Amino acid sequence: MTGSGFCGLKVLAFESRRSLEMAKLIENHGGKAMVVPTAREVPSACRAGLSEFAASLLAEKLDLAIFLTGVGTRALAQAMEQFCSRAELVAALSRVPVVVRGPKPAAALRELGVPITWNVPEPNTWRELLQLLDEKGIALRDRLVAVQEYGEPSRELLAGLSLRGARTLTVHIYDWALPEDRTPLKNAILALQQGEIDVTLFTAAVQVNHLIQVANEMNAEECFVRALNDTTIASIGPVTSERLREYGIRVDLEPTHPKMGLLVSEAAAFRTVCPRECN
């Protein structure tokens, strides 16, 4: 309900592209929003695998294509312009079974006009992706599978594909970098250490990596983790939660679906049962 839920608590969220939307959601649920970017997308210097992907795709040697992110799918389509026209790209992808990991890459492919064979169910992790391939009985042994990567290598997915006998071709078009201005990130860490934050929201695993990196630069990792654990921590889904736990950070809740709106509303509902902070 608008104006309720967080009861005026200070809510720290880490979000870049949708920071204004995140702040509005928090405020609509009665919170005082502090939204801080932790990452920016930058083109990969080497664009690993792009030429091999283009050659294999255009020669009809690919047996399966996996798209993991919307940003990466759009970046890959743009990068392919040096090898073929957009129409040729769409025609070539239309001849290959395509798997998408959730709504964002699905939307990007629909914009291009590429048919989608299978969409990975929620929570859209590598586990559900591999389970989908198993349930569909997709033969992978000695098949060439292209994987559009994002930010960091998809090690678990690649290992699972290799265990099933697939030959993998990874396409790495962009990386995650820290924001050019780290001041807001440092201020967020200080706010946590000073006990000014009540609720913390995470929407991606890379946010955890970058926070730990900056906290280390401030010689404050141990203090930062301890302060973070004093807040209510909500994570968008299993991959982000796993990364948090790797650093000894407790996760209080994940939303019923990995959506930003539900992350905020369910975190607000979780805090509604704590009337002490509402006084």
Image (spheres, grey):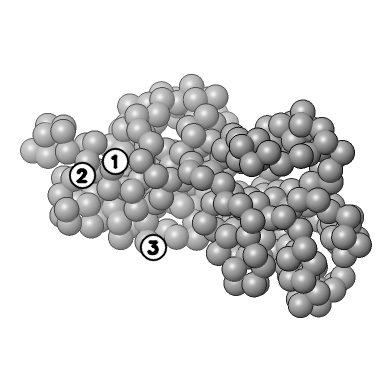
Whether 52 is drawn above or below 113: the answer is: above
Q: Are marks 2 and 1 in contact (CB under 8 Å)?
A: yes
Q: Residue at x 43, y 45 (%)?
A: 258
In depth, the one of 168 and 276 nearer the eye is 168
Amino acid residing under circle 2: Phe
Residue for badge 2: 6
**Cα–Cα gap, marks 3 and 2:** 18 Å
Residue 46, quarter of the rendered image: bottom right
The answer to whether residue 60 is seen in the rendering is yes
Task: Using the image as rendered, state which of residue 216 and residue 200 is in the foreground.
Answer: 200
- Where is the C terminus found, in terms of image quarters? top left
Front residue (pair 248, 163): 163
Q: Earlier in the sequence, mark 3 or mark 2?
A: 2
Q: From what the image shows, is residue 201 above or below residue 27?
A: above
Q: Residue tagged by mark 3?
A: 20
- Residue 28's mark? none
Q: Which residue is mark 1?
A: 267
In the rendered image of this protein, does residue 56 appear above or below residue 229? below
Q: Look at label 3 and name its amino acid.
A: Leu
Looking at the rendered image, the disc whose residue lies closer to the viewer, 2 or 1, is 1
How packed is label 2: few (under 14 Cα within 10 Å), some, or many (20 or more)?
A: many
Q: Position of residue 201 (x, y in %)?
A: 38, 42
Mark with earlier residue (2, 1): 2
Task: Please name the residue shown 72% across and 59% down the image.
Answer: 43
Q: CA distance from mark 2 to mark 1?
A: 8 Å
Task: Residue at 45% x, 29% y: name it.
Answer: 224
Residue type marked 1:
Ala
Q: Secondary structure at mark 2?
A: loop
Binning the other alpha carbons within 10 Å of mark 1 as few (below 14), some (14 to 19) or many (20 upward) gives many
Q: Is residue 97 left or right of residue 248?
A: right
* Secondary element at image label 1: helix
